[in-house]
Amino acid sequence: MNYYIYGYTDKGNYRAKNEDCMLINRETVAEGGFGSVCIAPFLTAVCDGVGGEQAGEIASDLCIRYLSVTDYDSTVDLDQRILQIHNKIVKHGIQQPGSVNMQTTLCCLAVDENGAATCYNIGDSRMYRYVNGCVRQISTDQTYGRFLYDNGAVERIGELDESMKNAIVSSVGSVIQLPKIEHIDFIPPFGRDEDDTVIICSDGFSDYVSNGEIESAMSLENATFKEKIDALCRLALCNGSTDNISVIGIKPWNTGEEYLRITSGSIAEGESPQVSEEKRHMQAVIAGREKFEDIENAEADINSRLAQAADDSLAQLFSDLENFRNS
């Protein structure tokens, strides 16, 4: 089986720098979009530097770079490898001024040579699986709010203060404790269903985009896979995200026809899919950049015409003054 992977990361509208980092087919991606086709075995991941700690962007970058040189297959103990990466980041932080206790989340999809897929998660970045038109969260947020809820200390996570609710209780790089590595095997196997898709994201995305909006974007038949992921990122910004945003989408494919559907987004001739209001909204988001460029071009044209009109009026004024002097 083949896999198409596309990811996009952005510092967002409020942060001065991007503390997110992505792994796509052994490439480290810290800004913009990147797509690739790969075969199993492979690892792909999102890391999000922990807010409030020093050098989060260095921690996320190091975690991805160490992970990128891992020759993964079914014989590799990925838990042990992640712990080794954790220790390397701790050591690096202690040795570098201003970097002590730098931390990052890690949400990773591991697919071995047999096609078996597993989610490895530390922190509050998320993994979703979209199948048969529905999306569900695969990973569990390792936050203090979730910890209190799971242990019966609170009835609703939403009743907690924001800082308490969202504080993460496990990370890569913490000098206080080892990361708690969560792993979830995929059942049924990844790629069995036609629309089977995995989405990995940082909390700058997941906190501002609903499951329904993800489903609407992924179900658009006339958009490319890249357009869907880019649109979801823009939607998070439109919905008010104040954090860095990173999203990776992974789509299995077998035939050339399937690959063309993923990359071209074309639909059958004469087909006119009926879309819900949410789908129409997502189509508008996808088309937003083009519409914005059209508006910019129109404004530039108007400004150019106004400037030309002003020049013509000024030239006419000078001509009238010259004629008045000569009369």
Image (cartoon, helix red, strand yellow):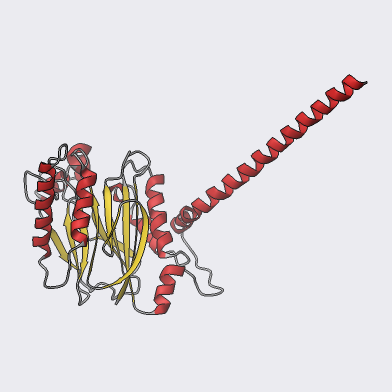
Q: Position of residue 2 (x, y in %)?
A: 31, 75
Q: How many badges with numbers are in the image?
A: 0
Residue 232 can be seen in this image? yes
Residue sitting nearer the eye, 310 or 250: 310
Give the residue at x 73% y 36%. Answer: 309
User: Going by the picture, which residue comes out furthest to the left?
Assistant: 177
Residue sitting nearer the eye, 241 or 27: 27
Residue 16 to residue 180: above or below: above
User: Going by the picture, which residue comes out furthest to the right?
Assistant: 327
Image quadrant occupied by the N terminus: bottom left
Residue sitting nearer the eye, 94 or 8: 94
Give the residue at x 76% y 29%. Answer: 314
Q: Position of residue 5 (x, y in %)?
A: 33, 65
Residue 252 to residue 305: above or below: below
Q: Is residue 212 left or right of residue 101?
A: right
Q: Is residue 60 left or right of residue 147?
A: right
Q: Position of residue 161 (x, y in %)?
A: 20, 36
Task: Determine which quarter of the picture holds residue 22.
Answer: bottom left
Q: Position of residue 252 (x, y in %)?
A: 32, 72
